[in-house]
Image (cartoon, helix red, strand yellow):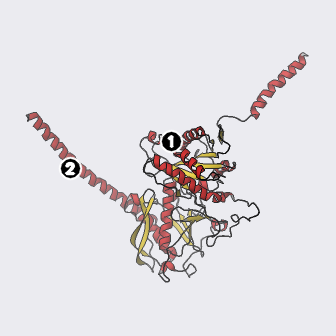
Amino acid sequence: MRTVLFVLTIFLVALVPICAGAAPSQQETTPSTSTTSASSKKPVIVLDPAHGGADPGARGESLLEKDVVLQMARTVRAELERQGYRVVMTRNEDSNLSYDDRAATANAYRDSIFITLHVSSTGQPGTARAYYEPMEAASSPTPGAATPNVTSPAPSAPALMAWDEAQQAHSDASRRLADAIQAHLAQLFPGSAGAGAPAAVRGLRSVAAPAAAIEIASVAVSKPESLTALAAPLATALVRGITAFRAVDPNGAK
Amino acid sequence: MSRNLKLALVVLAVAVLIGVISFRKLHRRMARLGETQTSETRARQEVLAPPITTPTDTTVKATIFWAAAPDQLAPVEVELPLSADPVQRSRQLVHALITGPSTPGQRTMPADAVLLGFYILPDGTAVADFSDALASETPSGIMSEQLAVNSLARTLENNVAVLRRLKILIHGQEVDTLAGNVDLTGFFDLHPPAQPAGAGAAATPPSAPGASATPPAPKATTSSVAPSSPAGSSGKASR
């Protein structure tokens, strides 16, 4: 009997670390997921602090874009979660993700909105701009271009989507998203433009969801606090902009 | 008025006078320093990329798009000797775009950026190959990078009618982004303004003899599978 008990004890002791190893770590993982009591109808918000790791992004005297955007993303995430959104961050540490890694995080969800956060090198400090990638449909191929092979799906069959063209189907929704966010950025960031702007942002191209890049000006500020203080109004503007976008187009994130 | 007060007023007046004189001197010195830097930049550019002259050069009014604000371009009419050959004409325009800004605020592309090669394919695709300085010295940011691309695209499309789209290479290679944000893997669509037939060299058809040079088969041309993505206000980019 003692032998059986001994064997059982050893077995249980051995089982504990195995079980612990099998359980997913709740610490900083990439992507880090945070679920709240979100309504299941609300889209997943994928927040992407741009750059990271060996890629610092814009550099100021005492600021690096990669650090500022990570800090801002955490503030934005907290505010979005307070509003009942489920938020996923592409990175939660100083890691260097590829553009495809970031897009893959968003593309893993059926119903998501992708927001990538940036800080510029130039521009009037304290202003902000929302950008979208206005990819067009393949109806008018450019002169000399090879025949499009990914953008004219047959009506009856679900078409394959080229990874590099994933944003194309969501371009119109992305423009509306950027405009909705920019309208609220303009209220909270004096001097900002009133509408979103088109730009060939590399990080948006492969995202199969409404997507916008938000760029705050700039790392050239003399006091770092003046830039980090913009995280709260940025969070407010994003929550209001996303809510307004959803109100007009509740299916826009699909 | 007491004697001390008078004395204090006199001292104050003298101090203000000295301040005004010093300020004017300082202002002049700063202006001279700015001019020196501009001329140094131009001298460096002339060594790196000397002005291009061709037998068919004719002085015309060219429209160059420089920055009017950190996020805005403005067309500026400049009299330039431009070639009848679209390739040489494009090189001259890019040279003017880089070396021509009269103030630092107008600059959209780094002063040290050099156009290493420029080719035009028969379909109107322009391939502009720049030195590393374009990528390494353009300030990182969506706004600044898009401004640089737009200024190049709009300057070319307004002055070289045969161009239909633009591909930007860095040191002969396709790169992901200009300085970390704006996508350079695609083509930027160009939309030349309508011009009357026979309106000069810029309207020379792309198939005209000598009008184009063929680059060493840019990989991006064959990998282009589909349409458009953006180049910002100047138009779209396609892949």
Q: Whole-percent x and y of residue B129?
A: 55, 65
Q: Residues within 10 Å of mark 2 (few under 14, many from 20)?
A: few
Mark 1: amino acid: Ala
Question: Which chain is home to disc 2?
Answer: B
Q: Taking the image as drawn, is residue B88 in sight?
A: yes
Q: Is residue B26 left or right of residue A110?
A: left
Question: Which chain is home to disc 1?
Answer: A
Total tally of numbered discs in the picture: 2
In the image, residue B204 above or below residue B178? below
Q: Which mark is residue B75?
A: none
Which residue appears at 65% of the width and 65% of the height? B226
Residue carrying label 2 = B21
- Give the spatial CA distance, label 1 vs label 2: 45 Å
The answer to which of A222 and A172 lies nearer the viewer is A172
Which residue extends farthest right?
A1
Judge depth for marks 1 and 2 and give the one in front.
Answer: 1
Q: Whole-percent x and y of residue A164?
A: 66, 58
- Name the image quarter holding the C terminus of chain B: bottom right
Q: Residues within 10 Å of mark 1 (few under 14, many from 20)?
A: many
Element carrying mark 2? helix
Residue carrying label 1 = A231
